[in-house]
Amino acid sequence: FLWGVGSSAYQTEGAWDKDGKGPSIWDAFSHKKGKVFRNETGDSACDGYYKVKDDIQLLKELKVNHYLFSISWPRIMPTGIKTEQLNEKGIQFYNDTINSLLENNITPIVSLYHWDLPQVLQEKYGGWQNISMINYFNDYANLCFEKFGDRVKHWITFSNPWAVAEKGYETGEHAPGLKLGGCGAYKAAHHIIKTHATVWHSYNNTWRSEQQGMVGISLTSGWGEPVDPHSQTDRDAAERYIQFHLGWFANPIYRGDYPEIMKNYVGRKSAQQGLGTSRLPTFSVQEKTYIKGTSDFLGIGHFTTRYVLQKSFPFLQVSSYHTDHDLAELVDPKWPAPGPKWLYSVPWGFRRLLNFIKTQYGNPLIYVTENGVSEKVQCTQLCDEWRIEYLKGYINEILKALNDGVNVKGYTAWSLLDKFEWNKGFSERFGFYHIDFKNKNKPRYPKASADYYKKIINANGFPNQKEVENWYQKAMDTCSTTHQLLATDSLITHMEMVTEIVLPTVFTLCILISIVLLIFYLRNHS
């Protein structure tokens, strides 16, 4: 069983315009006022571009088997178009990263796309609304296979494409910030699914025999539990919840087409609006055959669960993905919610989701690619007992799912570092390592959960209650010591800032006053 941690390029690398990197849609989006909380940007993020060696040291401390990271498309192909230019410095950066990981016996799992589309492709073609993305992305993927595939054996085409489609082209909360209600998300997803299949076939035909690697996709989904498990309408609504999230992407890849329930609901609502065709695009017979079976493993991101019930939306002229599935989501107020409003800790939902995948898609090989919890607090909290509880609960449910016969082979905790959380800026912190973003050196400090996760990895799970309680106590003791160190460092940083600002200011004022006095003196004497 593989244990690891993950991160993504835009959230951690920084160096947004350095060494020949082209702009991405997230550079453009975060530079517009009002798009991100407090107008924060990922311009420097965690300075991961300059701190690869430091961060690999943290991975060694955790004793992980693998590290999941993403490649920034515009860092190695500034305009996104292969024939226009390649950025050798960007390629070198990822070569160095991969080599360093392997030297330290850490397996790289590489995502080709974690949301940072080259801005040129958005401006020229409308990004994922345009079918031409298939060829541009395929060229980029093939370049990555060519440059890195001799050492990288686990490839993810897209990380959480649901968010790319829904938040990028439906609600506009994420880059590129388009609100193309009712159609935009479906169209973007359609092109992403076709692109994924094209890349899988590229690998299969050109690289697989030589490189012997695997290509999969990473899909993020919550679990939907019927409010009343005895009510057929609630059970149907919960089924729709999963199909409109996970099934939207997984069904075409594992079964050859969109879920029937999606086709029926979106088709019916489109007809009610007087549209001649469904807002959900269709795959041709050839496309269905081409797409089906294009995943060597399924990456699963999972954070939380919702109770679901039937809710009919009145006939609306304004269509939306969110009203298409006729359901409402509820939460149990007793569920712990340590971080943001959306992330409740509901471990049992994870086992149900994993079993659903086993049943629906023929028990595929699963790697958990994202699972974790953030804190949303203004004061620094290194003693994150709620994250320890979350990890313990969710990892335990994976073990139960394994005992149910689910073919899950690895777990990736999200995430290594506190980092830029998209439209939430730096207000949500998912990391095992706290970063002091106010300090220009961006120092990393381990939280209690880092120590606890290290123990889980070392024991390959949970040995016995007493020992696990012991881990908890030790983790809490360690974080108290680290907290004192952080407090001292913060004070020194503050003093340095004061020194850097105050001393030059006082010095400048003294010189100005001296000049004024000298002028007066000279005037009086003359």
Image: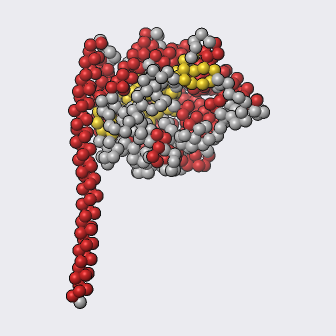
Q: In this figure, what is the number of numbered marks?
A: 0
Determine the residue positioned at 32% across, 15% down. 462
Residue sitting at x 54%, y 29%: 200
Please provide percent x and percent y for residue 215: 49, 27
Where residue 150 sits in the image (x, y, percent)?
41, 32
Res. 319 in view = yes
430 relative to 362 in the view: left or right: left
Tell me which corner region of the image, top left, top right, bottom left or bottom right, holds residue 482. top left
Viewer-proximal residue among 307 and 281: 307
**Left-right relation of 55 to 412:** left
- Quadrant in the rendering for residue 322: top right
Which residue appears at 46% of the width and 48% of the height? Answer: 39
Up/down of 272 relative to 334, above or below: below
Residue 487 place in picture, x, y as percent: 25, 40
Quadrant in which the C terminus appears: bottom left
Please tell me which residue lies in front, 367 or 353: 353
